[in-house]
Image (tube, rainbow, N blue to C red):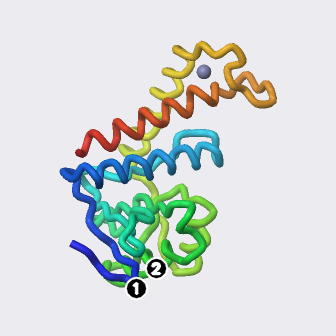
Amino acid sequence: MAMQLAEGVALEGYVSSKEGDVASLREMYTSYLLEEYGRIGELAFGSPVAGYLVTSFIRRDGENAGYVSLDHGRCSVELIYVCPEHRGQGLAKLVLEELNRICPQTLALKTPLSPGGEALAAELGLERADNYPHETAKNEESLRIIREGIKRTCQHKSRGRRGGDPRKLCQRCYQSALRRYANAVIDKFS
Ligand SMILES: [Zn+2]
């Protein structure tokens, strides 16, 4: 089902039995993780798809321009992502405004927020939703598994460090681990 937001812009439900949907979400979630890794240097939290989430593509002129995953029970946005080539056109704002309008209470954005998320929350008067303890525990467990895996298996001589900081994990291995993690998350619900 699709929901028209503006001329040429719609939300369309993610269908986990459609190969094209799975491939598209996989690609965008992988990009999200790699971009966030570039910004924060770690695994970014937030699921694109899960049992408690409703996931939709943000469609622009018939093509997937991003996605949003919504926790209806908490009226909170778990993740919203717009592809780089579709940024700067207010797509995220349009989507959040509409979700805020249809939710019975003020829409919240799941923390931690990116700088763009912070700006939109302030502009639209949205709430912030912190993770539940079990979600935090799950996030920390994923992070621990990724970090331990990289430490155990990295064979790269330089170990990919920038600036020689011995606490930093190998970048190449971290990026590979994020790709595998994205596949596992998407495959679990397809
Ligand atoms: Zn490595």
Q: Amino acid at mark 1?
A: Ala
Q: Residue at x 64, y 25 (%)?
A: 170
**Residue found at the very far bottom of the displayed protein:** 7
Secondary structure under tag 2 reads helix
Does residue 160 appear left or right of residue 68 in this picture? right
Q: Which residue lies most toward the left here? A: 17
Name above or below for residue 46 compared with residue 157. Answer: below
Residue at screen point 49% across, 30% down? 177
Residue nearest the viewer, comparing 179 with 133: 179
Would residue 6 be visible to someone looking at this image?
A: yes
Locate the C terminus by quadrant: top left
Give the amino acid type for the residue marked by disc 2 in the picture.
Leu
Q: Which mark is residue 94?
A: 2
Q: Residue shown at 56%/77% (left/top)? A: 89
Q: Are marks 2 and 1 in contact (CB under 8 Å)?
A: yes
CA neighbours of label 1 inside 10 A, class few (<14), some (14 to 19), many (20+): few
Is 190 above or below relative to 145?
below
Quadrant hosting residue 69: bottom left
Image coordinates for residue 125, horizontal then vertical, percent: 52, 80
Residue 71, quarter of the rendered image? bottom left
Instruction: Find out if the beta carbon at label 1 lies less than 8 Å from the nearest ligand 1 atom.
Output: no
Residue 6: mark = 1
| Mark 1: secondary structure | strand
